[in-house]
Image (cartoon, rainbow, N blue to C red):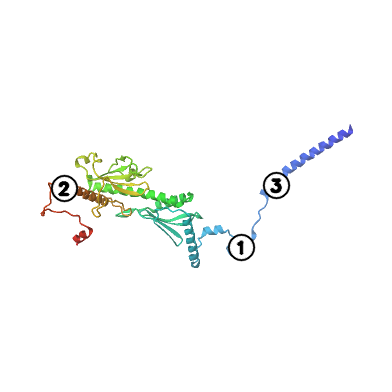
């Protein structure tokens, strides 16, 4: 039938045209991608003329200029900027909960200074990595020391330690709690290391075998076992571990047993250990009386100037006074012993009497 054949020819022609249109669109797409590489660049003639004639470029990006030089505020703008920064620092300090152990907080000249007696002093400001909400450490000073001065902290280690503190403070919800916990634990370790070094020096000098010391394995409450420490061991090896161990210093050793090390249960001792609040505590093995006050003796360690020998001498003085009082009490209760006018009386000199005697 001629009509049917004609319709079939039209359908075939339309199908061919559809294929051609599809191929044409594909060819145009790939041609467009090729033209991007073949086009000639557009030269910035005005900018080139400006650079050649003036030697500068006014539209240089500001970030490139900031890398080249640091902008210093004029004197008339510096004071208002510092006052504004001080106000911002005070508001940030009021928003956060500070550890109760921080004894002094001052804000001046755009910096905040925090101090913990006997441990550390740190100066901070805002602007860690350009973020005004994060804290940046400007200076860190350790206040732990002995008779020779404060513990030396190398500048390289100080900077590395400060960078680590800044990083942890930036990731913490309360940065000052993180700051205090890290620095406090570090200072406690320094205190115990200093004690061990001083005891080793005492044993190598005039005290020799008159004293011994070992580690208390549980530094939190002093209820754990005792670890025998080689008397010439390095402090770093002695204090390695998750918790800082305490020290037990024994004196009035039995000469016949001191060589064997079996007198620990018989000799009096004084303990130096971190308490449950991680503060250094000093305690005596028995009840002793302070000869100056007549009350129970209290022992403490000055972390700014650690002197284990003075602490040991005071413990011996109190223990000796307590034993003399016990002997006096026993003699007073003995009816067969009486005091006569010719007897020699021993008394404890007060501070005033000692001063007069020295003059």
Q: Give coordinates of residue 240: x percent, y percent.
A: 36, 43
Q: CA distance from mark 3 to mark 2?
A: 117 Å
Residue at 31% x, 40% y is 226
Q: Is residue 166 visible?
A: no
Q: CA distance from mark 1 to mark 3?
A: 35 Å
Q: Residues within 10 Å of mark 1 (few under 14, many from 20)?
A: few
Residue at numbered disc 3: 32
In-front residue for pair 236/89 = 89
Q: How many marks?
A: 3
Dividing the picture into quadrants, the one containing residue 209 is top left
In-front residue for pair 127/254 = 254
Q: CA distance from mark 1 to mark 2?
A: 109 Å
Q: Give the residue at the far front of this rendering.
A: 335
Left or right placement of residue 271 versus residue 129 in this view: left
Q: Give coordinates of residue 320: x percent, y percent.
A: 21, 49
Left or right placement of residue 356 versus residue 223 in this view: left
Residue at numbered disc 1: 50
Between discs 1 and 2, the one toward the N terminus: 1
């Amino acid at each position: 039938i001629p009509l049917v054949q004609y319709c079939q020819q039209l359908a075939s022609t339309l199908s061919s045209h559809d294929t051609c249109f599809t191929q044409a669109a594909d060819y145009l797409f790939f041609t467009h991608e090729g033209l991007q590489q073949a086009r000639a660049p557009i030269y910035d003639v005005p900018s080139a003329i400006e650079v050649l004639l003036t030697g500068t470029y006014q539209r240089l990006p500001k970030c490139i200029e900031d890398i080249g030089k640091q902008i210093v505020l004029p004197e008339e703008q510096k004071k208002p900027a510092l006052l504004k920064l001080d106000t911002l620092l005070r508001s940030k300090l009021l928003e956060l909960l500070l550890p109760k152990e921080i004894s002094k907080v001052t804000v001046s000249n755009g910096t905040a200074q925090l101090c913990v007696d006997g441990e550390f002093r740190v100066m901070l400001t805002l602007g860690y990595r350009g973020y005004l909400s994060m804290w940046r450490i400007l200076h860190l000073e350790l206040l732990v020391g002995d008779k020779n001065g404060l513990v030396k902290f190398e500048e390289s280690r100080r900077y590395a330690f400060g960078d680590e503190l800044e990083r942890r403070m930036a990731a913490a919800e309360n940065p000052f709690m993180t700051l205090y916990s890290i620095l406090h634990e570090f200072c406690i370790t320094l205190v115990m290391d200093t004690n061990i070094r001083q005891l080793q020096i005492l044993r190598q000098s005039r005290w020799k075998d008159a004293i011994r010391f070992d580690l208390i394995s549980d530094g939190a409450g002093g209820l754990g076992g005792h670890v025998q420490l080689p008397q010439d061991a390095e402090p770093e090896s002695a204090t390695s571990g998750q918790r800082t161990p305490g020290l037990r210093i024994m004196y009035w050793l039995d000469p016949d047993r001191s060589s064997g090390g079996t007198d620990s249960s018989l000799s009096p001792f004084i303990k130096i250990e971190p308490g449950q609040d991680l503060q250094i505590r000093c305690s005596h093995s028995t009840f002793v009386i302070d000869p100056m006050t007549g009350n129970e003796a209290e022992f403490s360690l000055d972390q700014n100037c650690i002197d284990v020998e003075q602490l040991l001498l005071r413990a011996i003085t109190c223990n000796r006074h307590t034993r003399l009082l016990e002997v006096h009490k026993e003699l007073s209760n003995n009816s067969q012993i009486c005091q006569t006018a010719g007897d020699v009386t021993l008394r404890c000199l007060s501070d005033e009497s000692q001063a007069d005697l020295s003059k």
